[in-house]
Amino acid sequence: MATLAARQGQFSDLIFAATPPPAAECAAAGLRATAALAQRVAVYRNNVHHALLQALRDTYPAAQRLVGAEFFAASVRAYVRTAPPTAPLLLECAAGFADFLRDFAPARPLPYLPDVARLEYLWQQSYHAAEADSLDPQQLLSTADSAQLADAHCICHPSVQTLHSDYAVGSIWQANQADVPDTEPEQPIDVDRPEWLALLRTGLGLEAQVQLFFLDAPTLALLNQLGAGARLGAAMADTLAEYPDWDAAAGFGFLLKNGFFSQLVK
């Protein structure tokens, strides 16, 4: 006799099959092979797929706007067949969609689409991150000992998310927001322009908003190093070694002024 886990796996296969299952396949999953039962499984299957489609529409509205509702729905159907949900949170079910689009042959004419989707998922991660106050710049400036400051850790705000793309995905994302009319922009976007992006949630509670920042390559590199736990002095030195013409004071000052850090740990 099949175990409960085996039965659940068989039922999941029915739900995420390419087409609604006939009665015989329901019987193979341990269900009574009747036409009425197959019909009820089909209804349940339809409800599951509809909920997942709506969850991904809510997570990736700009991606859907770029490709249209019909193409988006077809890509979601293909995605859930290859990666059925394993987490109870619908947002987590959407986590692998950007990677799926990268390998999805019908999406290849839009090579920037996977990174647009990746940015949208990072936006959700930023919005739902833990709340924290941003570091007061005066706290850092009050550390007079430069050696002590260089040895300190600048802890990133929990909502910070970063993305470097070979395409202008931040600009494309902004142009495909729901409140942006469907008209030709005054200046077309150069989609092949690389962008270095950071997301940060400002405000608390109902006042919270996720902001998109366009950085330069060295400032993003510094932010990523600090986010990975590097000490400030070492991160600065490594970034300047790679980008010797970078204005380190301006780059770090921009991050500090805009609230990218929540703590200074000496």
Image (spheres, helix red, strand yellow):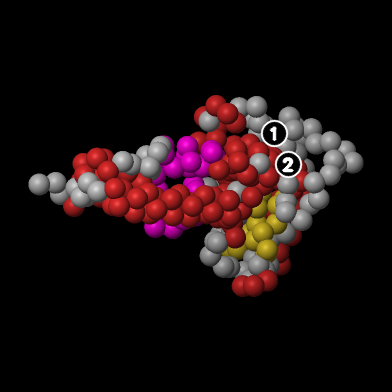
Q: Residue furthest right?
A: 186
Instruction: Please say whether residue 163 is visible from this viewpoint.
Output: no
Q: Quadrant of the C terminus?
A: bottom right
Q: CA distance from mark 2 to mark 1?
A: 9 Å
- 164 and 179: which is toward the camera: 179
Viewer-side label of 2, 1: 2
Residue 40 as seen in the image, left or right of residue 32? right
Residue 41 coordinates in the image, percent (x, y): 33, 51
Depicted 135 relative to depicted 163: above or below = below
What's the magenta bit mostly, secondary-structure-wise? Answer: helix
Which of the 4 image quarters holds residue 139?
bottom right
The structure residue drawn at horizontal position 65% and vertical position 34%, both measured from the top left corner, is: 112
The structure residue drawn at horizontal position 58% and vertical position 63%, both measured from the top left corner, is: 263
Residue 85 as seen in the image, left or right of residue 220? left
Q: Is residue 84 magenta?
A: yes
Write down the residue under mark 2.
172
Q: Is residue 26 magenta?
A: no
Label located before the other in sequence (2 or 1): 1
Query: Dot 2: what SS?
Result: helix
The answer to whether the residue labelled 2 contacts the one labelled 1, judged by CB atoms less than 8 Å apart, is: yes
The magenta stretch is 74-99
Depicted 187 relative to depicted 39: above or below = above
The amino acid type found where label 1 is placed reads Tyr
Q: Residue 14, which numbered label?
A: none
The amino acid type found where label 2 is placed reads Ile
Residue 20 coordinates in the image, percent (x, y): 38, 42
Instruction: Please say whether residue 203 is visible from this viewpoint.
Output: yes
Write down the residue under mark 1.
167
